[in-house]
Image (spheres, grey):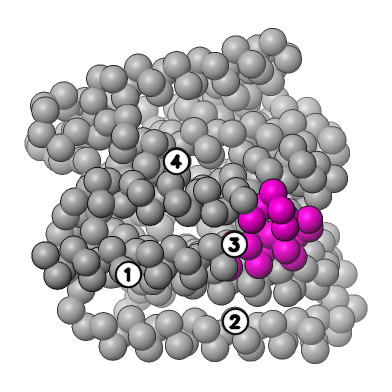
Amino acid sequence: MLDKITFYCLSISSFLFNILFLIICDKFGNIFLEYLQILVYTNFFICCFGSLQFYIHTKKNLIYLKLEDKFLIFLIILFFIGFVYYLYKDLILSIVFLTTSISSLVVHLEICSQTFLNKLHKNSAYIFFISLIKFLIIFFSFFNNLDFIYSIIFINILIIILSINFLKRINLSMTKKKLFNILSGVNNIFGTATTTLDKVYVIHILPTLSVTYYLVFKIASIYQFLTELVYRKERFEITSGKYIKNKKVLFFKFIYLFTAIIIFNMTVKIFFNFFQSYMNLFLIYDLLEIIRKNIDAISFFFLGFLINALSGLSYDQIYKKYLYKELFNINIIMSFIFVVLLVFFGLNIFYISLIFFFSQIIELLLINFKGKSLNAK
């Protein structure tokens, strides 16, 4: 019982520290926009490794990543293009891109390895530790008028240094059986389109909304975070090769989360003005104001993440058995639909939240149809 309480406390604290980190970053002014763009592109780069936990094996406390050499070359070229682009813009920004990419990749690799090893509590403690470090350093930098860019570089380098022991355990496995290849990476890019391409779209098409949208999406991602907590046991079981038999538990969890969205939306609309008048505290007030102004958009993001949690379980079961081969076409179709909807209807934050919600419904239907067709064979 104590372990479960600790796990939930660490997980919720991690999310809050991440949100507060971004709110403080926004207070540094326009320079945050440059970092935000780097962050968006870096996340797009990292999503190539979205399903890496299915290509890991361990031996004698060492972690082996089953990667194809062509994929590594593709990855290096992709990274080099981004680095040269920012080097052409500004030397300091290129260093930010370099350190952000490496630190984000290191964090993602460690999370993937812990997921594969089914180390639920170690995973939550690690994410909490990283979130706390980022928040404390940026908080200290803001109140002491330190340079924002150098603070970000320091955070990235510190994360890399603290991860050296983990990196020493990493080995590459180039055996020909079930390698993570270029198609695996491309499939992941298409598969995460609904949570990456929207940021790219907003930064370039709706730049005045980019900071607000990113913060709204991050706040809304608490529901992605919450659904991961609620369904984490099932996700970890799938990753470790088990099959979920008790569908009633999934249904009751869905009803619970859906009801929570309705209650949250009504609570914000009825009581938030009262809360704000008594919570005029630094950062807390900013957080409440963002929620109040964008509650309907946040609620539709919530619904989208809830539906994504269900489709994600079916997606992982298919991926565990067939890898990317049976999901590639679905991801391409979803990316195309999402981009078309963004281009024609992505006029503001609320419309983009609706697009995200409807995209998740379509994806759920496609994945369930694919799952039933595979089971019928």
Q: Which residue is mark 4?
A: 189
- Relative to residue 344, is residue 96 drawn left or right? left
Is residue 98 shown to the viewer in this render?
yes
- Please tell me whether the stretch drawn in magenta is mainly helix, strand or loop: helix
Mark 2 and mark 3: Cα distance apart in space? 16 Å
Q: Nearer the viewer, mark 3 or mark 1?
A: 1
Horizontal and vertical percent for residue 151? 68, 30
Is residue 126 shown to the viewer in this render?
no
Q: Which residue is mark 3?
A: 356
The residue closer to the viewer here, 232 or 247, is 247
Label 3 sits on what residue type? Phe
The residue closer to the viewer here, 268 or 5, is 268
Residue found at x 78% / y 28%: 147
For the residues bearing labels 4 and 2, Cβ distance under 8 angstroms: no
| Quadrant of res 76 | top left
Give neighbour class at mark 2: few <14, some 14-19, many 20+ (Cα, 10 Å).
some
Q: Which residue is mark 1?
A: 368
Label 1 sits on what residue type? Asn
Question: Which numbered marker is on residue 32?
Answer: none
- Relative to residue 366, is residue 180 drawn left or right? left
Residue found at x 69% / y 20%: 93
Q: Earlier in the sequence, mark 2 or mark 1?
A: 2
Q: Secondary structure at mark 4?
A: helix
